[in-house]
Amino acid sequence: MKSKYTKSSPSSPTEQEAVQGEPLDRKIYEKKLRKLHCELVLLQQWVVTKGLKVCIIFEGRDGAGKGGTIKAITERVSPRIFRVVALPSPTERDLPSPTEREKSQMYLQRYVPHFPAAGEVVIFDRSWYNRAGVERVMGFCTEEEVEHFFQGVPLVERAMVDSGIHLIKYWLEVSPEEQTRRLEARLQDGRKTWKLSPMDLKSYSRWYDYSRSRDEMFAVTDTEFAPWYVARSDDKRRVRLNIISHLLSQIPYEPLPQADIKLPKRQAQGDYQDPNYPFRFIPEIN
């Protein structure tokens, strides 16, 4: 069983001098994306038929393009099979305040119920790595809690992989200039203002605190059994194509035989007549 997509080596987030080139043309992007969507459908069929369990993690700074990349992956597959999990941020989780029972739970416990079962692909739009990122940088946890997290997470991920879960971790690396451009665009676009929270504004100024946290996170949790894959995301179209191609290379699959499906004949009208009923049609905008 081999995917036609070749595995690639992980990139380094420090290689900012690498040039991505001009932004990818929309027509070229849509043509390539269509082909990749067809491959994702084949992968979906393989996952269901073989009972695979796939867990994909997306992490990165605010404005790195996680949401758009996840949407590009999921827009042509079944949401019952490709399931997106986006748990509340630390500030949202504090409203209302956690119960004493929730406070006493192991940190990763709230994520475990969302792990994939056979025939599922679960995509985490941010994950337990919140603890190593926003929670640490913004002071929502202690350094002792971070240390406990670093000690425990490789063990949990080892257990996930040993249980048969395909665990794939992506970090989207955006440049400071592009992050600024995207966040400023959110301020000016009424469709995007919801994406810019007070926490985003606070964290924006702490670029190098996030860099240090990311570096330590990689050093501890970039393991052979659950490595981090880094994708430069200044060009949104390119990063979506690159990640989908890479994702397809990580899970060996084959096209399954397709049934020769034809639409059956529609039944005859018989004595049915359209009702004389005042349907409430919505207004049509020209």
Image (cartoon, rainbow, N blue to C red):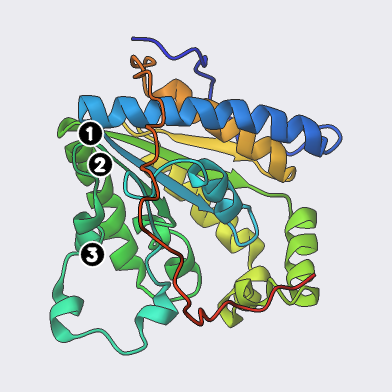
Query: The C terminus appears in which quarter of the rendering?
Result: bottom right
- Specify whether 35 is left or right of 146: right
- Specify whether 29 is left or right of 69: right
Answer with the quarter of the image where residue 49 lies.
top left
At x 29%, y 89%, the residue is 97
**Distance between mark 2 and mark 3 Cα atoms:** 15 Å
Front residue of this view, candidates 5 and 174: 5
| Mark 2 crowd level (few <14, some 14–19, many ≥20, 10 Å Cα) | some
Q: Are marks 1 and 2 in contact (CB under 8 Å)?
A: yes
**Distance between mark 1 and mark 3 Cα atoms:** 19 Å
In the rendered image, which residue does mark 3 sit on?
110
Which of marks 3 and 2 precedes in the sequence? 3
Which of marks 3 and 1 precedes in the sequence? 3
Query: Going by the picture, which residue comes out furthest to the front?
Result: 271
- Specify whether 243 is left or right of 19: left
Q: Percent from the top left, x then y, of residue 38?
A: 52, 27
Q: Percent from the top left, x then y, of residue 264?
A: 37, 32
Looking at the image, residue 255 lies above or below residue 26: above
In the rendered image, which residue does mark 2 sit on?
157
Amino acid identity at mark 3: Arg
Helix or strand or loop: what does disc 1 sit on?
Answer: helix
Query: Going by the picture, which residue comes out furthest to the top?
Result: 1
Which marked residue is nearer to the observer: mark 2 or mark 3?
Answer: 3
**Distance between mark 1 and mark 2 Cα atoms:** 6 Å
Answer with the quarter of the image where residue 107 lies.
bottom left
Q: Percent from the top left, x then y, of residue 265?
A: 39, 34
In the rendered image, which residue does mark 1 sit on?
161
At x 21%, y 46%, the residue is 156
Front residue of this view, candidates 22 and 203: 22
Helix or strand or loop: what does disc 3 sit on?
Answer: helix
